Amino acid sequence: MKRNVVECLILALLLFVIPLFAMGGAPREENGGETSSAAPAPEPESADTADDFAILDTSTGNVIHVSRLEFLRGGAAAEIPPSYELEAIKAQAAAAYTYYARLREQQEQSPDPSLKGADFSANLSIGEKYVTPELMKSRYGDRYEEYYAKLDEAAHAVNGLVLRSGGELIDAVFYAISAGVTESSADIWGGERSYLVPVASPGDCYAAGYRTSAVFSAEELKTALLSADASLTFGDDPAAWLTDLQRTGSGSVLSLNVGGVSMDGGKFRSALGLRSQNFTFTFADNSFTFTICGYGHGVGMSQVGAQYMAEQGASWEDILHWYYPGISIEAL
């Protein structure tokens, strides 16, 4: 634990505090004023609109329509705890709306017949991508009115605003916890985006789930990897099965040698169910022990990082400009 705190402090000094002052993103002053180098966002719309999302509910097979404000509330609720700071919730709502508005544009240009005219699909019975008011009541219990009011305030604050780069809606991806520095989309997925590049996110290493571990016996690991790729071969010495780990600049495993064959780091992570691609491992007593940092793909906005920035006084605009550098916040 002591080691984690020391690592976090070093990351904060080298990767966050210094760059943050360099970009002018100082925390809010005690009187409620704030300073930021980012251009202020345009005034959001205050009323709901006919603009909506069509969602194919995979739990029923029905297509439902939700208005913009409904989705801003429910989309944020699906991704971030309502107990988070209001500015973090606003940032999440704007990012989620932009992400799915981009999918809507893609469906308009090239419809997928399996979606039955919807913009995207989701299992609404479990609140995947969008949480209905009914499900909110079930989840939040006695705190439903409090949390709904908070989500509603965030929704109204960003209603009608989206994130753009070069005039296009951005691929506003997000995830739970980074490993202290976010990843480049070019490294993780092979598609370069000027706004999906590594930025410091040292507040993440204070999160309860920042560092986790997973243990597999040699046979369990072999079975899991063969399920992902039946062509792999394994020798008699398990200690020699995993070699030649290649990493991104932010620390995630790009690829590794598995039984003499190169495997993509994302595929390896998926096969073992690891929380991220940023991992190390040891082998002893016929078992592999993995130590994993972060939770998620690591590209774009860290939700825990957004919460940390909000706690330090950053606005939702500051958060989005930090995690998606070079973007603009514009009226839809």
Image (tube, rainbow, N blue to C red):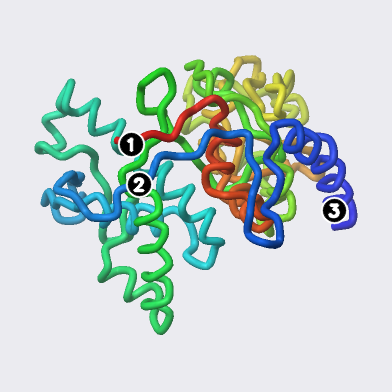
Residues at marks 1 and 3, CA–CA distance in whole angstroms: 41 Å
Residue drawn at point x = 29 percent, y = 35 percent: 332
* Residue situated in front as seen by the camera: 27 or 183: 27
In the depicted structure, whether residue 274 falls above or below residue 231: below
Residues at marks 1 and 2, CA–CA distance in whole angstroms: 7 Å
Instruction: Judge whether residue 222 can be spotted in this image.
Output: no
Residue drawn at point x = 52 percent, y = 67 percent: 83
- Label 2: state its secondary structure: loop
**Do the numbered discs 2 and 3 sit on residues whose CB atoms are within 8 Å?**
no
* Image depth: mark 1 or mark 3 in front: 1
* Residue situated in front as seen by the camera: 47 or 11: 47
Give the image quarter of residue 160: top left
Residue drawn at point x = 79 percent, y = 41 percent: 17
In the depicted structure, whether residue 233 falls above or below residue 52: above
- Label 3: state its secondary structure: helix
| Residue occupied by mark 2 | 44
- Label 1: state its secondary structure: strand
Residue 47 lies, in percent from the top left, at: 24, 55
Residue drawn at point x = 36 percent, y = 56 percent: 155
Residue 149 lies, in percent from the top left, at: 38, 70
Residue 51 lies, in percent from the top left, at: 18, 44
**Do the numbered discs 1 and 2 sit on residues whose CB atoms are within 8 Å?**
yes
* Residue situated in front as seen by the camera: 35 or 218: 35
The type of residue carrying mark 1 is: Ala
| Residue occupied by mark 3 | 5
The type of residue carrying mark 3 is: Val
Question: Is 55 placed left or right of 138 in the picture?
Answer: left
Disc 3 crowd, CA 10 A, few/some/many (<14, 14-19, 20+): few
The type of residue carrying mark 2 is: Pro
Question: Is 307 placed left or right of 110 in the picture?
Answer: right
* Mark 1 or mark 3: whose residue is earlier in sequence: 3
Give residue 331's mark.
1
